[in-house]
Amino acid sequence: MNRRSFLKWANMAGLAVALPSPSVFGAAAEDAKAGQTPSPKKRVESPETILLKDYRPKSIYKIPVTEIAKAKFPIIDMHSHPYAKTAKEIDEWVRNMDEVGIEKTMILTMTTGAEFDEILRKYSKYPERFEVWCGFDFRGYDKPGFGPAAIKELERCKQAGARGVGEIHDKGKGLRSGKSNAPGMHPDDARVDALFDKCGELGMPISLHVADPIWMYQKMDKTNDGLMNAYEWRLDNQPNIVGLSGMVDILERTAEKHRGTTFVACHFANLDYDLARLGEVLERNPNLYADISARYAETAPIPRFAAQFYAKHADRLVYGTDMGVDKAMYRVTFRILESLDEHFYETGQFGYHWSLNGFGLSDEILKQVYHDNAAKLLASRRA
Ligand SMILES: [Zn+2]
């Protein structure tokens, strides 16, 4: 889950969220701090003092604007989370999925035990529309004898209905599955060998998130191309973490070690800034896929290069969102993948200041990325 999806989830869950002031509410938040009634109209911004985080440009070009209400082909969403908490919210989500063309959604719960069972129960009304994936239980990972209990819980979740595992994170400090942490233990660690092999045996793919976007590791200064998001999620100030490149090496060693297990690297393995390297990693590792979730804004500034990458690796990329349940959210992803629109902004959705461009992917590529690769991956489990 990222900050955006957390905010959406919190909103749906009816929580009052007190996070560092989201920029869209900047003026209101400042007023609130001063103990005054928020009045968005009150402040007249001087161009001298507009902050990058408040920058909301509007495109002036008179060029085609493509509105895509429904995806061109049915979609399997390989990266989502249990955003909908109640039966009513789940019903609404299914209606949204119908309207925009999402056939099925993977609910990556990151949980085990009773917490997993509860989410599974809630979503079981729609077995054809949702798959509920479990997490790992890393308890005791730092003590001798770790392994059998984690495998036993994995088997129990599988028995209950889990068809895959995720989202498992390692942002450089070690593995994490929701609330279950294993600081210092990375995915290529021998201690998880049996667990990862068991996933292969059970036919459970692992959705694995390594590292974070490159801007988070770079200097937080005027040269940082993704500063406004990078600063919120900064990693440049974290000592002793494995860097992005090192985490990609770990991902590759992990895929190599467990050839019988299928891995889905989340968010282009955070190589959205270096797609050529991702291409090489995919070519070397036949059991590795990459999901395209939550990296739309990061790839839409380079539409020609991105489209070439999609064409070259169309058989290994799977659609994902990771950004809540709104119809508008799905539609932005369709516009980026399907249209050839240029220079449009989605600062509300993504938070970056860049203008975006569509890739204009061919029908053949869209079918693969939207549906067929995921369908193949999921069907292979039953063999
Ligand atoms: Zn996620």
Image: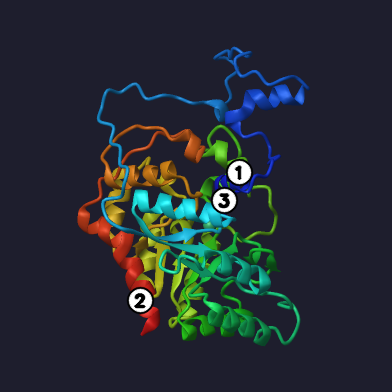
Question: Would you call the spot at circle 3 few (<14 residues within 10 Å), some (14-19), or many (20 or more)?
Answer: few
x, y (%) of residue 195?
58, 82
Look at label 1 and name its amino acid.
Asn
Q: Is residue 201 visible?
A: yes
Seen at 75% across and 19% down, the residue is 36
Tell me the element at label 3: loop
| Figure quadrant of residue 182 | bottom right
Give the residue displayed 47% in from the left and 70% down from the top. 252
Label number found at residue 11? 1
Q: Which residue is mark 3?
A: 2
Residue 358 on image: x %, y %? 31, 41
**SS at badge 2:** helix
Q: Quadrant of residue 360?
A: top left
Q: Which mark is residue 379?
A: 2
Q: Nearer the viewer, mark 3 or mark 1?
A: 1
Task: Please say whether residue 286 is visible from this viewpoint.
Answer: no
Density class for disc 1 (Cα within 10 Å; few <14, some 14-19, many ≥20) is few
Q: Crowding at label 2, few (<14), some or many (≥20) Cα neighbours within 10 Å?
A: few
Q: Quadrant of the C terminus?
A: bottom left
Q: Residue at the spot x=29%, y=66% of the render?
A: 372
Mark closer to the chain start, 2 or 1: 1
| Disc nearer the start of the sequence (2/3) | 3
Q: Amino acid at mark 2?
A: Ala
